[in-house]
Amino acid sequence: MDVLSLIGLTPQKLCHASDEQLLQIQAQLLMGNTWGHWEYPKEWGRGKWQTLGRRSYRLELVLPDNEDPDSPFAQRMWRELLRLTLALRLWPGPFGLVSKPSSIRSLVGTIGRVLRGLADSSEESLWARVDPTNARIFGGKAAITRLNVVAYFRGMGALPDGPNAAMRKGHQPRRDRTGEPEHATPKNEGKQWQPFPDPYTAAAGWRAISMMQAVGPNVIGAMERAVSIPIRLTTAEGKPLSKSSIRAVNKASRDDVIKNWEWRAPDNSELNTLPMAITLSASGRNAGNVPWPPRSYSDTWNLINLLQTSHLWLVALSLAGRHGEILEMKEDCLKRQDSETPTGRFVTWKLDGVSGRDAEAPLPDVVVQTLQQQVRLAKLVKRAHGVENDALWVKIGLKSSTGAGERLNDLGTGLVAFNAAFGIEPLMENTNVHMHRFRKTLVRIVALALVHAPKILMDILGHRDEQMTVMRYILSDPGMLSEIEEVTRELIILKGLEAIDKRDQLQGKAAPVLRERVEQYAQLLGRNALEPQNLREFVESITEGGSGWAIIGPGKVCTGFRTGGLCNAASGEANPHYCTPECHNQLLFPDYEQVNGTVASAVREAIETVDYMVEQLKCSAENGEVMLIAQFAGQITGLLRQWREVDQHFRDHHLNNPLITKHLSNVVLLP
């Protein structure tokens, strides 16, 4: 018998491999060397995929009832199913990627159920008797897609036969569409995996932040003190205590810590009541409203699980990570804590295969605090149960027998309990909570808040194609596009009305043109020019219905966004990244509205930014940081030649600085 090596192994060789050769390939792929059973190493799986049942497959799962495992029919079924498994492990599938072990197990499990349902030992072929119709009967809708994968490897030559008329993309038979309606299949607008409803997002977010800021420091601080108390094993006379006495004595010691703990609000006042009601849905004596302050160690411990899920809610929304990416986060996930933009680190596998790659995403301050507190929580639980690992999300329980302190395998159960505890399930509008909905929700928030959101979201979501962000996320919500367009148009029209009101204060090369158009409009309409309806119609005209202008930055507007200017050589839409003061479309306002609704001076902010950048340039020059010198010099240059007040401040305070002369020698200021 020839031994088949993985080097030089082709689909054709796999197709004609004997049982012994298939078993050898299985062993070389580290999937065991037992015929009728394969499993991949535990280290290859994540979360629930580390359990034996989810990382292995055996002959008994595909055989009909009362079928002899040693029969020729059973051996043929296992032979071809193993051949498919090895092909999935060896070569890229229809989408150009080698399947992950968990994906292989899931696919083989589905196909195995189909084969079990169609078992017929009288037929010589195995795959040819499977078609999309009976695949769906025995394996559900997912079986049809997975049948296409089998057909793909049959076409590659790795399998001796293939499914009957599997519907593969690009290979469907032609059909005459004459007389068919334009859209034969209605668009699926189900809400299951769409963004969370806005009322739910607001209510859940507020409760998660309240738990993190008000409850978290108290609960973790009290529990850390209680857990640090040494466990008593003997009486005062030195006699050993029984197991029940040890539990009773130590419970009393820990309960005393909780009873005497000072519960404080974030402002250091007494925290006598919780900011919201909490109800535990668990059965037994712990069910019902949560008492506050907690009366015992166990009462406090019951809040730990809810606190962890509150942390999870905030982290999942801000990082927009997939389920596995969030689940696999480690205690050292918080990076660049001392910088102005701390980041959260996680590993992503979606587009990078089994090995994955490290990814980072910027974090707001509240999520930085959340991660720091979650690290404390995870270490507390592990310490209480004598567990050592680096997992960020851990199983929580009073008894070690529950696996408390070990890495959490699933996040969905906690999120369901989170909604139940705060009584916000009705806000979900009869839909399920799901980790992927956090990604869609963040997309909705950013898309509605920022005009140029796709590039930002593409980076946050870890996509490599902007079309994926736009088509699969932003536009996956049927009503989001119209909402985005409506919000954007109204904001621009309001900005146009503001521009007319402040036309004498405007700067930039577009300002004289705007003032001239307003003057012509006033002459044309006379005393009726300032009537609200006429004024709005005029603004809609000059802003092209709100789509011809765009807000580029604080106090900065592009009046030719659809046609472009110097930023794109007037070809296509404007590119805000290359906005320049030399462009005839740039309009500069003296102030702008901040996120909290207050008005801030754009001029003053630009001056303060210039001063800050000059200081950073000085520090970088002293440290010899060539890259930073170029960065800060470029940022200073980008703030000049816009507002005259800024240029005048720069001329009066920085222009004669030798450092500026050296690194910004070619700067030209407004007169």
Image: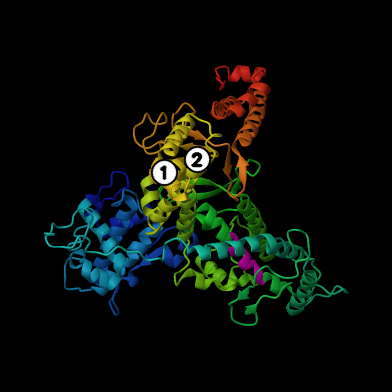
Residue highlighted by disc 2: 500
Q: Is residue 331 left or right of residue 179?
A: right
Secondary structure under badge 1? Answer: helix
Specify start and end residues of the magenta stretch as a single range: 302-311
> Is residue 55 rendered magenta in the image?
no
Residue 303 lies in the magenta-colored region: yes
Where in the figure is residue 586, as x and y percent of width and height?
A: 47, 33
The amino acid on which the numbered mark 2 sits, given as a three-letter code, is: Ile
In the image, is residue 628 above or below residue 562? Answer: above
Task: Give the residue drawn at x 29%, y 61%.
Answer: 146
Check residue 538 in the rendering and tell me which mark sits there, or answer none: 1
* Crowding at mark 2 (Cα within 10 Å: few <14, some 14-19, many 20+): some
Residue 615: x and y in percent read 67, 29
**Looking at the picture, does residue 140 appear above or below residue 467?**
below
Name the amino acid, label 1. Phe
Q: Viewer-proximal residue, 591 or 90?
A: 591
Q: Is residue 671 left or right of residue 161?
A: right
Residue at horizontal 54 percent and vertical 34 percent from the top? 504
Residue 427 visible? The answer is: yes
Secondary structure, mark 2, is: helix
Q: Position of residue 15 (x, y in %)?
A: 22, 55
Instruction: Count the marks.
Output: 2
Direction right: furthest residue: 237
Residue 496 horizontal side relative to residue 335, left or right: left
Identity of the residue drawn at 51% across and 70% down: 427
Q: Nearer the viewer, residue 157 or 468?
A: 468
In the rendered view, how is the structure colored?
rainbow
Residue nearest the observer in this picture, 553 or 61: 553
